[in-house]
Amino acid sequence: MAWKTNREEQHVREFFTARADGWDAQFPDDGPAYDAAVAELGPRPGDVVLDAGCGTGRALPALREAVGPQGLVVGVDLTPAMLRAAVRAGRNRDGRLLLADVTRLPLRDGSVDAVFAAGLVSHLTDAESGLRELARIVRPGGRLALFHPIGRAALAARHGRRPTPDDERAEPNLRPLLARGGWRLVSYTDEDSRYLALAIRTGGRPDPERTDRSRPR
């Protein structure tokens, strides 16, 4: 994820560490929404796909099924406890799990065909930096899905709030944010039952100085 200070990074790790063991049990009915979002992302057999901020890996089985045995699925998360929960759930069989920062991914430029990111943007201190790094590792024409199993209004209500105009996930804010990060928004859905923004990687290199990453083997 994109952090301005180590303290912010530590705060997020502590937040998710405290919730990792009960995360799946807290949201037991989200599976079909994950499956549908992966289907709309449209990874193909043989593709390389990344689950950015994979948490307990709920998208990994659907991603694995989509890319088949010849494809590669990578799940990246900042919180060790979340990755351990993914292993306990057996989802490490569906993809390789990496402990890594989304803004410094151990992947080569243009080595990924599609990225799935559930709940990622709201946890990034610098969303533009995170989106730019995702664009770096995705080939031109590759796809990005920004997903949440419920929409912004429903999520805000769950926490006793209302959506705010400055929410980066709102379409008027997200479209230019994605454009600055190397993406073109092509589809946007924000309903009580789900949030899904699909984007296409545009041409060019949004972060030309970072060329020393390598694809996991």
Image: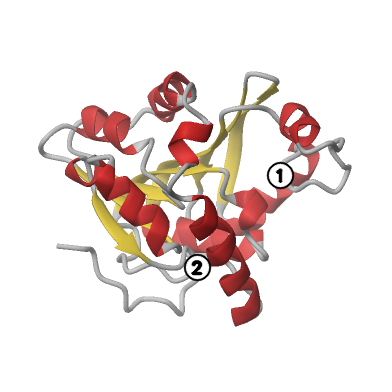
Q: Which residue is drawn at 62% across and 69% down?
A: 11
At x 63% / y 55%, what residue is drawn? Answer: 123
Q: Can residue 44 be seen in this view?
A: no
Name above or below for residue 210 compared with residue 1: below
Q: Which x, y percent locates residue 98?
A: 30, 61
Residue 89: image location, x then y, percent: 28, 40
Q: Identify the image quadrant of the C terminus.
A: bottom left
What kind of residue is marked 2? Answer: Thr
- Say which residue label 2 marks: 103
Marker disc for residue 174: 1
Would you call the spot at circle 2 few (<14 residues within 10 Å), some (14-19), or many (20 or more)? some
Residue 118 percent across, percent down from the top left: 51, 41
Q: Can residue 3 be seen in this view?
A: yes
Q: In this view, does 121 lie to the left or right of 203?
A: right
**Distance between the Cα atoms at labels 1 and 2?**
18 Å
| 148 and 7: which is toward the camera | 7
